[in-house]
Amino acid sequence: MSCLFTWNTRRQDLQAQRSRASEISKTYATELKRDFNLGIGRTVALKQMIKDNDGQVKYFSASAKLLMKNYIDLIAVAPKGEITESYPSGKTASDKFTLNYYSEICKIYDYTKMTGRVAMFGPVKLPLVNQAMVVVDPVYLETGQLWGYIIIAIKVPKIYRHTMAALESLGYDYAIKATASPTAKKLSLVESSLKSSQKLSSPAVYTMKLGSCRFRLEITPKGGWHSSKTIPILVICLIISGILLGLLVALLRITEKDDELHYFAYRDPLTGLYNRRGFLHELNKHLAQVPGDLATAVSLDLDDFKLVNDVYGHDVGDMALIDLADRLRAAFPKDTLISRNGGDEFCAMFFGHSPSYCERLIKRAVVQEKSFKAGNHEIRYTISAGYADWPEQTKKLERLLTLADQALYAAKLSGKNQSKHYQEGMNALNRKQLGFTVKKLAEGIPGEFLIYQAGGQEEIIFANNRLIEHTGCGDFEDFMAFTKGSFKGLVHPDDLNEVEFAIKEQALANRGKGDYDTYLEYRVLTKSGTARWMVELGQMAQDDNYGLVYFVFMQEKEALAKPFMA
């Protein structure tokens, strides 16, 4: 009886472990599928471009450059099944790729003709890449005719490295297996956390379809399946003291699981701070224990966080959020309640400190210089904050957080990178100006507007729609292709040397003396080959992200000469 009881307890424990592992394998297989779909989805824009141009491939290099990510090795187009253009490797790499994998590509071509589906094969070895999965996406014109294919090589394991690292952090080893092509039946190993000679023992498995291939994620706990309850239960069956000890162990395990569930329910997974739910739970608990305690609430967020994401990518945006979370922990007392409410919004609550002391902490945290390294870039950012005091300004919790939020918007309306203490009337502030983006403001300028880097290749950073339309371009990508991404490509070649010299000469002579650094007249080219005489007002400025940049306002010379009409 004792042995049967021990065996049954062990079986239930292992069954619970396997049930949890099965759910985790399903969750992370879904994340793995999402990772691959990010790469596969890069074909959509190229397909639409080819359809819109009736099968003509225009501006391939510029389009492919915009679609490239660090997990993509090759983007190519293959009208009628023959690769004609690729990025970034060029024709030589395309020929080499076709030669090495001609038979596999032909099989995939036949499969996509029959099914009309996106297909994938691999892994294959490519130059400078250990291995990659090759995606073949058929392109059908509006007439229903098969035009050809778009081919993308996705680097593995780079495409899913972050997802698998998160799985390992939970204490699991893994293996990813897949069929080499849609027509293959045998699963082959793509990636494993173990050495090549090792295999997972009785793994939890989840199988899915991806790129018309079968993928399978297998996981096992690091160290294998084992029940830590076997020995305690055996002792329980032998002696009374063992029973008591076993009950205590079981109770501790349940408490540990509850703590783990509580952590995931009340914590932000990116920063480790409390989430909104956890923040309010802890806040209510503290105020119930110490109802008369002094408190100051502060709302904070990163200034122009969308710009960080747009310029450097969401991975760097996540790094900025983690960096700010670490700085808030270091800047505020250990008993401070800090949370990330979502996006770039943070909240903190000080307990038992005077409002003046809290004000000094907040101001010091805001003015402190903030930067971190992301690859070769040093990313600088600022924050804004608003704060209010309990019970001096309100005795209602929800009202306190609302006041701090209103003070935050007052700080943003006052120019950002500062903190504001709540004052009466802040709730009446007009927040509409926060809705105006740089793009909206630029489109409202009554003229043509351009921003480019001063020096080097004079790379274009921004152009408003008026300038794009008046050069005969369809959109910003078309404009960048026409100018080759440089201010030099916009100016008439016969005027370029004179314009470049005049900009440098006037900028040095007029720097700081007036409203504009330069006043110039020169010809601007259009796609049709005509030239337009323009008058330019320009000014140089230092930007944290791009260095020295040039802001240019242009008007057609002929338009400026027209008299004002009442």
Image (cartoon, rainbow, N blue to C red):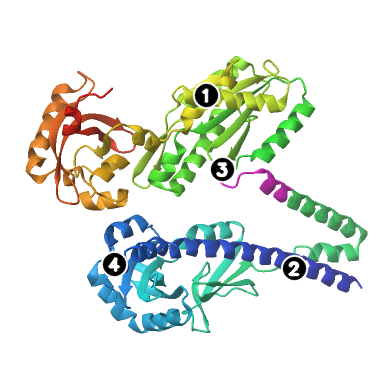
Q: Secondary structure at mark 2?
A: helix
As measured in the structure, the alpha-carbon distance from the residue carrying label 4 to the one carrying label 2 is 59 Å
Please, is residue 458 above or below residue 431 in the view?
below
As measured in the structure, the alpha-carbon distance from the residue carrying label 2 to the one carrying label 3 is 32 Å
Q: Amino acid at mark 2?
A: Leu
As measured in the structure, the alpha-carbon distance from the residue carrying label 3 to the one carrying label 1 is 32 Å
Prevailing secondary structure class for the magenta stretch in the rendered image:
helix
CA neighbours of label 1 inside 10 A, class few (<14), some (14 to 19), many (20+): few
Task: Answer whether residue 263 is magenta in the image.
Answer: yes
Q: Amino acid at mark 3?
A: Thr
Residue at the image position 59 percent from the left and 19 percent from the top = 422
The quarter of the image holding the N terminus is bottom right
**Disc 4 or 2, which lies upstream in sequence?**
2
Q: Position of residue 418 (x, y in %)?
A: 47, 23
Q: According to the image, label 4 marks what residue? A: 56
As measured in the structure, the alpha-carbon distance from the residue carrying label 4 to the one carrying label 3 is 47 Å
CA neighbours of label 3 inside 10 A, class few (<14), some (14 to 19), many (20+): some
Q: According to the image, label 2 marks what residue? A: 14
Answer with left or right where residue 553 lies relative to residue 405: left
**Disc 3 or 1, which lies upstream in sequence?**
3
Q: According to the image, label 3 marks what residue? A: 271
Which span of residues is magenta-colored? Answer: 259-270
As measured in the structure, the alpha-carbon distance from the residue carrying label 1 to the one carrying label 4 is 50 Å
The quarter of the image holding the C terminus is top left
Which of discs 2 and 3 lies nearer the camera? The answer is 3
Q: According to the image, label 1 marks what residue? A: 430
Q: Amino acid at mark 1?
A: Asn
CA neighbours of label 2 inside 10 A, class few (<14), some (14 to 19), many (20+): some
**Disc 1 or 4, which lies upstream in sequence?**
4
Q: Position of residue 126 (x, y in %)?
A: 34, 71
